[in-house]
Amino acid sequence: MSSQAFSPVHPNAATSDVNITIDTFVAKLKRRQVQGSYAIALETLQLLMRFISAARWNHVNELIEQIRDLGNKLEKAHPTAFSCGNVVRRILAVLRDEIEEVSMSTTVTSTTVAEPLISSMFNLLQKPEQPHQNGKNSSSMRTKTDYRQVAIQGIKDLIDEIKNIDEGIQQIAIDLIHDHEILLTPTPDSKTVLKFLITARERSNRTFTVLVTEGFPNNTKNAHEFAKKLAQHNIETLVVPDSAVFALMSRVGKVIIGTKAVFVNGGTISSNSGVSSVCECAREFRTPVFAVAGLYKLSPLYPFDVEKFVEFGGSQRTLPRMDPRKRLDTVNQITDYVPPENIDIYITNVGGFNPSFIYRIAWDNYKQADVHLDKKKV
Amino acid sequence: MSEFNITETYLRFLEEDTEMTMPIAAIEALVTLLRIKTPETAAEMINTIKSSTEELIKSIPNSVSLRAGCDIFMRFVLRNLHLYGDWENCKQHLIENGQLFVSRAKKSRNKIAEIGVDFISDDDIILVHGYSRAVFSLLNHAANKFIRFRCVVTESRPSKQGNQLYSLLEQKGIPVTLIVDSAVGAVIDKVDKVFVGAEGVAESGGIINLVGTYSVGVLAHNARKPFYVVTESHKFVRMFPLSSDDLPMAGPPLDFTRRTDDVEDALRGPTIDYTAQEYITALITDLGVLTPSAVSEELIKMWYD
Amino acid sequence: MSESEAKSGPTTLSSKAKQAATAATGAAANGEKKLTNKELKELKKQEKAAKRAAMKQANGMSIEQQQQQAQMKKEKKQSQREQQQKREQKLKNASKKKQNERSVKKSTLFGHLETTEERRATILALTSAVSSPKTSRITAAGLMIPVVASALSGSNVLTASSLTPMGSSTASAPAAAVPASATAPTIAPSTVLSAASTSTSTNTSTAIQQEISSSSASDVAKTLASISLEAGEFSVIPGISSVIPTVLEQSFDSSSLVSSVKELLLNKDLIHPSILLLTSHLAHYKIVGSIPRCIAMLEVFQIVIKDYQTPKGTTLSRNLTSYLSHQIDLLKKARPLSVTMGNAIRWLKQEISLIDPSTPDKAAKKDLCEKIGQFAKEKIELADQLIIDNASTQIENSTTIVTYGSSKVLAELLLHNAISLRKDIKVIVVDSRPLFEGRKMAETLRNAGVNVMYALITSLDTIFNMDVDYVFLGAHSILSNGFLYSRAGTAMLAMTAKRRNIPVLVCCESLKFSQRVQLDSVTFNELADPNDLVNIDYENPVERRGNKGALLKQFIKERRSEKKKLDLENKPKGNKTGSKNGSVEENKDTSNEGDSNDKNILDGWQELPSLNIVNVLYDLTPPEYIKKVITEFGALPPSSVPVILREYKGSA
């Protein structure tokens, strides 16, 4: 669906068409057929583009509600595909910014987004809000077309951003490693890490050794492919079993991890199990851990209940089939949560940040009102 | 007019409304001051506020919390003067809306409860040190949402605020147990998370609170238990203490002078302490869940916006 | 085989043969010369063959057997020839490439440690030295003809069934006529040796021996052709030569290794067959765990001592120690000795030295065997009992216990508590790739009805989010500075537990205490076979795939490329058989490669110079992660290890 979704869809296209597309995408998400946050983000954006092109609304708030509904639907379909909700929120933020701007310039206080996003402690003494007049009717026709444009432009910009994320990250990250350094990466499925390492080798001509953990049982294939690719690019590569991390950590200069989602508290969900143990080891040895994350991985959620965010897989990957009467319980963790205290720095395409500062980057890109897409606005 | 005593007013506010926090009482006291004194010029108003603030801070031994209220008030007045120049309007607004601030402050507690309820899940054992209205409102809210959790409340000497919290929770039907302060280390492993309130939140994100908070914080950190501070954002204060003995206190932290033979009376020492930000997992405030470093940002925004 | 022996070899041969041999060394390079030399050799060979046939007939061998043997020798010779060619090729490629290849095998971090391949090469050299021609199908470890391999139930090559006859046949071999029987078994090692040191004088002698052994070869072209035939139909023809893949061969680049191999070869006759059997078991991880390894070793020592005969002119107390040392040298080549084994050996040697020289051998031997039995009982069985009793007090009703991998004493402890004491315990067994020892542990416990959960080390976060009361760990050894030396992954588990304030307890017999000190896991460790990590079924990762085929595959691949080269060489000569077989082979090649290629992504990792696989077996857990160590002396802090070592060394 990737290519045709890009082609501008006529606004008058039947909404049922879009609904079908949405339903198929939801089904795909439910069956976990779209893999990787990169692909999910892009597909979501393309879907959103079609959706907005076909959407009809009287007031921009209706559009926002519609997008929220869609986002909620997608999130429900795959609660741990964070990039999906993230991009939806990003587009919502673009729209809300536009609304604010419009309301500022036209002095018509049609602000239904009443309070500032982070209401400051100052609010305490602020004057009570003025009951605002409704300037809906006057500007509805004009805004309608405007906002569609704004949203679609926002989507296009975001697609561009997501596609060019590695560039920005590499620029910063390369300066963080020195010659002959030993690096360890427990997330061999991260394309960002792979590209970064290859660029560091080829463009900056640094020599370094990369240790790759196997990520057994769910990611071993990726790990082996990752190692092979690195070796083919003339990077000294060592494949190590997951159990040997502690033994080798004393020799490691830096740990690089890829991320699946980054939360406002600076914690991260990685797409490979065992990463939290690796980062804990690194913390124990005072080895710096740096995480690479595209901006779209940033999520405005707070990991209150980590277990809700961590995914678990079937037992067939941890244990061979056995006598059903003597069954064993088993755990197969697919993703892993790394708490902020075990990460030293985040490298994003907009710069490097301390985990404790991530909340600010999040609020730069999202609106507080959109954190919970499932909550109806009061 | 000269009979107006800022300290008395402040204390009266606190007495009249047990739900009122110290910073709000301070703000209310200052509003009352403006109402009574009715300064003629902007400069006079500023001077009146300044001197009264100083007086208030001096007269109250534990001034951290009210200092936050005074700070906000002062800043608000200054900002309105500088930015908008309509000090009359500002004064008018302040005098007229005294009650509004109080209700807003109370509302912010509800908001905290709303935000913080996600931190409590079924089967949690929560340790609470000291009695904080914000913490109680959060626990109360969680109980109303039918979350099944248990509480361990410290006695919180010397103020014995723990007893108060204990009976409140008991009434609410929340399973609760009271322990002596010195037992925290013994039970910390069995506890899932720690909630404390704060009298003031310093620039660094560390908190100033009832004595013992620091000990609890260190123990929780050592046991790797999350340590949450539940507080209203109007308690953020432009202070940056380095340690507990860096706090404004009535007397020296350790007093070796001999007074009486009565042991109970001889019990002296600090009543507040400072818990540095590295022991704090997150601050649950009406502005949302903040990392300690976000506090600094709030304060910077307030003073330099 | 020592160099001196090798040198003395040629002197017994006629000068003609010497010439022939020198020529043969350059055979592959110079075809024409070969032919003339060949004729000379032929004569010599036929003569020898006749002699041998006669001899064998005298020994009661049927003609068929002889033929079979001859066939085997032929094959052997072919493989050697082939290797020689390879060697020459390698020489051409200069040392630069060699160095590259070396770095393939040794990773940057663990260059100081002996690799499995080095150990394998040694064992291989040795086994082929010890084995008689009859059983020479025994080849490189992991290198076995599939037909035979499937026939044998065992997973690997040097199985019991194949080793025992080998041992016995060596024992009976000396009866055979000197020149014939002596040359045959030594061929393989000399090949290996010469592979390593192409420049040394052994080269010529080896070549000669090779020529001698290839009794029935009639013509070079034919031989070469049949090589390709055999290489291709490897899986069809049973009984094959001693073949060493170049990977292993390269291991002999280091001179120290070569000398150690020579040392071993020199004493090969001293080696007891049961030691060989044990060596193979150890090398293939059939016996794992430091306690089972130690018990197995002690049992074998009992047999060895029983069979031991004091040579004339010396006494048992003097000679037995050195005799045992030879056995131990071999054992070391299987895997580095475990600390328990080392401690037991030290104790045994001390016991031997204490024997009064006047004691009759028989009595002394009996006494020693009894003492060994007693030692095992005291130090292991009774110690385990004490440990279990002590640790059981720690386990209350409804506790959750996390353990890692497999440990004999832990399994007993948990079973004792769950079954005999009827405590309601929950056990979480954490496991890791590639050995999956925990599976065995989990199954044992599960089958006994214990509430077990199984998880992999990557899921540590989830496991410790459950209500865990204790972590119980087994040990390989506890070092004198309090560090726990145990299966790789233990340290990570202990660290995670410690960071969550969950007490970590180690159950460990004092036999495992070591005098050694060590600071990190890199300086001293054991490297297991990297190929263990290569083989994996990505779709179904739980099915453990052995690396049986890894070396075989490697070998076949080498053979294939070799064969192709040979085919090219042969074709101009118009040899029909060669080309015919070649074409048949070609087809097989493609079909074979088709199904084997896509299986493991890392297959052929040896060819990527910058790719390495590290499979370390152990890691070090710092003492600060360990709450207590439960031994037969009671529960101790890890810092008390040196105290025990000092106080009780006498009794140990």
Image (spheres, coloured by chain):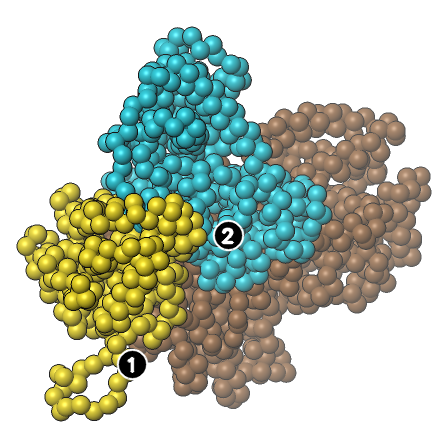
Chain colours: A cyan, B yellow, C brown
Pick the residue in front: C367 or B204: B204
State whether residue C442 appears in this view. Answer: no
Find residue A345 and name its label: 2
Task: Give left or right: position of B55 versus C498.
Answer: left
Please tell me if label 1 and label 2 are on a single chain: no
Callout 2: 10 Å neighbours few (<14), some, many (20+)? many
Q: Quadrant of the C terminus of chain A?
A: top left
Task: Give left or right: position of C234 versus C45.
Answer: left
Pick the residue in front: B199 or C386: B199
| Quarter holding residue A118 | top left
Question: How many tags in the picture?
Answer: 2
Q: Chain of mark 2?
A: A
Find residue C502 and name its label: none
Q: CA distance from mark 1 to mark 2?
A: 41 Å
Kind of residue sitting beneath label 2: Ile
Residue ID at (73%, 44%): C79
State whether residue A151 appears in this view. Answer: yes
Q: Position of residue C219 (x, y in %)?
A: 84, 38
- Check the image and report above or below for C558 versus C251: above
- Check the image and report above or below for B263 versus A222: below
- Check the image and report above or below for A289 versus A47: below
Pick the residue in front: B141 or C380: B141
Residue ID at (23%, 45%): B111
Q: Nearer the viewer, mark 1 or mark 2?
A: 1
Residue that carries the numbered disc 1 in the rendered image: B252
| Residue closest to the far front | B40
Dot 2: element: strand
Residue ID at (60%, 53%): A176
Q: Position of residue C162 (x, y in %)?
A: 55, 50
- Check the image and report above or below for C161 versus C229: below
